[in-house]
């Protein structure tokens, strides 16, 4: 199958990022519907039901999955609705902290994780993954005035890591990436949300925030006037997919068939490009 790719030469002008933000806002305002209401169900409140697809989400990763008012929106929310239609099921979004996603899935409190989860070898020990739908990677956000002082490559950033303070979001592949590749860093500060990390970055308490590329671009767009910018390097290559219990072979097969169908009918790429409008 064809998987969307973030270009390794990501050095486009910042106005493209601003355009991306406006397009994301438009997409979200054009009636992306879900079962979200004023209050989302908890993992314990939705029992297994053959007519309901229980989707585990952590709504802190725009443009992949987040809240607009009380409604859950984003790339994953749109995919979840379409997958539910494909299965002939209604969709119940189960909001969970990120670190509880896999335990809740294994405890049969959710049926599938559709929350911007990267495929990793450690996660594959515990759960199965659908075919990937997007190829991305880790990127860095920094203060605009320091952008020219920071190396523009993985090797360069690794070389300066001994003097750098890195911010990461706890439990993400960004945290694992920094631990594995920048172990000699002056400091690594874990945060519960990217918003908290951004505030510390603006205050100079950290030098770089490492996170998934689409999220880094959106954070840069949201904080452009506050003096933040993207370091134009893709630091890693990762694949996003949906997490499913290993013994739920039927749902795994259905998810793969759905992705194949969306790809064959040329529906996958347009949805991805609407939420993550990156250059080729």
Image (tube, rainbow, N blue to C red):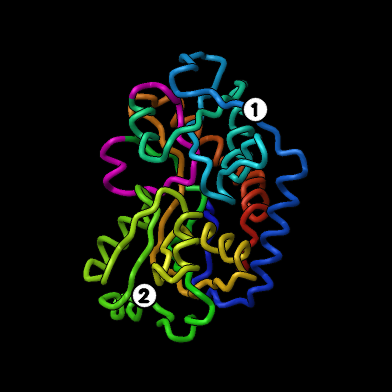
Q: Is residue 5 magenta?
A: no
Decide: is 250 above or below 27. above
Instruction: Check residue 38 in the rendering and tell me which mark sits there, or answer none.
Output: 1
Q: Would residue 206 be found to the left or right of residue 222 on screen?
A: left
- Of helix, strand and loop, which one carries label 1? loop
The residue that label 2 is drawn on is 154
Q: Position of residue 179 (x, y in %)?
A: 26, 60
Decide: is 116 above or below 216. above
Residue at the bottom extreme, as displayed:
148
Q: Nearer the viewer, residue 100 or 214?
A: 100
Please give the name of the residue rendered at 48% of the width and 46% of the height, measured from the top-left corner.
116
Q: Position of residue 67 (x, y in %)?
A: 61, 41
Decide: is 123 above or below 142. above
Q: Residues within 10 Å of mark 2 (few under 14, many from 20)?
A: some
Q: Position of residue 199 (x, y in %)?
A: 49, 61
Residue at the left extreme, as displayed:
184
Please give the name of the residue rendered at 47% of the width and 81% of the height, measured from the top-left corner.
146
- Of helix, strand and loop, which one carries label 2? helix
Give the extent of the magenta segment. Answer: 107-126
């Amino acid at each position: 199958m064809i998987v969307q790719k973030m270009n390794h030469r990501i050095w486009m002008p910042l106005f493209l990022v601003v355009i991306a933000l406006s397009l994301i806002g438009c997409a979200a305002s054009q009636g992306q519907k879900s079962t979200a209401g004023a209050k989302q169900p908890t993992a314990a409140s939705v029992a297994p039901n053959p007519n309901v697809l229980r989707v585990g989400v952590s709504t802190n990763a725009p443009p992949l999955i987040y809240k607009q008012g009380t409604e859950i929106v984003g790339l994953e929310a749109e995919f979840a609705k379409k997958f539910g239609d494909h299965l002939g099921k209604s969709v119940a979004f189960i909001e969970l902290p990120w670190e509880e996603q896999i335990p809740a899935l294994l405890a049969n409190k959710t049926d599938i994780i559709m929350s911007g989860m990267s495929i990793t070898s450690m996660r594959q020990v515990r759960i199965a993954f659908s075919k990937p739908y997007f190829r991305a990677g880790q990127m860095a956000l920094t203060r605009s005035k320091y952008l020219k002082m920071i190396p523009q490559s993985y090797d360069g950033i690794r070389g300066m890591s001994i003097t750098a303070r890195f911010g990461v979001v706890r439990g993400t592949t960004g945290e694992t990436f920094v631990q594995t590749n920048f172990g000699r860093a002056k400091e690594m500060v874990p945060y519960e949300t990217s918003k908290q990390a951004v505030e510390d970055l603006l205050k100079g308490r950290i030098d770089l925030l490492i996170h998934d590329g689409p999220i880094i671009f959106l954070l840069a767009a949201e904080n452009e006037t506050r003096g933040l910018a993207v370091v134009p390097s893709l630091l890693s290559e990762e694949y996003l997919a949906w997490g499913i219990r290993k013994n739920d072979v039927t749902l795994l097969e259905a998810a793969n068939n759905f992705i194949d169908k969306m790809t064959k009918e040329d529906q996958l790429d347009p949805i991805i490009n609407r939420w993550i409008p990156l250059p080729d």
